[in-house]
Amino acid sequence: MRNVVPAELGWVVEADGSSRALCPDCGVTSHSRHSRYWRKLRDLPMQGASVTLKVQLGRWRCRSRQCLRQIFTERVDGVLLPHSQQTNRLSEVHRLVGRALGGRSGQRLLRRLGMPSSQHTLLRQVIKAASGSVWQPAIRVVGVDDWAWRKGQSFGTILVDLECKIISAIMSTGCVQRSTGSLQCLQVECSAQLIDNK
């Protein structure tokens, strides 16, 4: 940590990066710095006041001859993701609040707690976390139904777990035709076709 400076709405914590870094492709440690850059990150508040981390990270040269990457940026594993503008722990709080309260209510609560965020950001993080989960329980009984997104032009297919009464997947017809292999990976014991009663 280099310095802690009071700002208009909170605190700014300045810090330096490491004196060496691992290449994300080959894993070789590099001591050859290419350049430095500043990165601003939002973090959890301190006594209700927002905290911004201002970290000076490095760009490094990979000296391994087998590695295709010549220059890479310093990673701070466990603290933030690449291209992220906030720390992992602040993202986790935003996800939890967004999931429990939704967009507008979560936005009001987080503003009062010193972690301002827009309602759209909260919902985007909840959706991102949900789409990132790859585990699905085995489906014993599946229902399949087709419908038209636009009459006569584009069609969709829905897969429903009939025992749990939850939607397993919604796909466009082109996606279903391209990914029949992914449908075979579902552990299905019996299936039922949903039929429109007209």
Image (tube, rainbow, N blue to C red):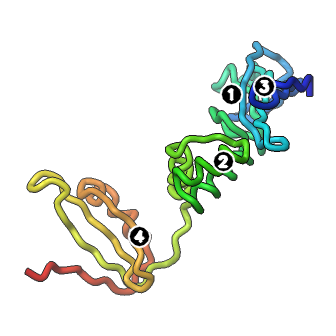
Q: Nearer the viewer, mark 2 or mark 4?
A: 2
Q: CA distance from mark 4 to mark 1?
A: 41 Å
Q: Which residue is mark 4?
A: 168
Q: Earlier in the sequence, mark 1 or mark 2?
A: 1
Residue at 72% x, 35% y: name it: 42
Q: CA distance from mark 2 to mark 3?
A: 22 Å
Q: Which residue is mark 2?
A: 110
**Percent position of residue 110, x then y:** 66, 48
Q: Earlier in the sequence, mark 4 or mark 1?
A: 1
Crowdedness of circle 2 by 10 Å Cα count: few (<14), some, many (20+)? some
Q: CA distance from mark 4 to mark 3?
A: 42 Å
Q: CA distance from mark 1 to mark 3?
A: 31 Å
**Percent position of residue 86, x then y:** 69, 37
Q: Which residue is mark 3?
A: 54
Amino acid bearing label 2 = Leu
Q: Which mark is residue 67?
A: 1
Q: Nearer the viewer, mark 1 or mark 3?
A: 3
* Residue 4 located left or right of residue 77: right
Q: CA distance from mark 2 to mark 4?
A: 32 Å
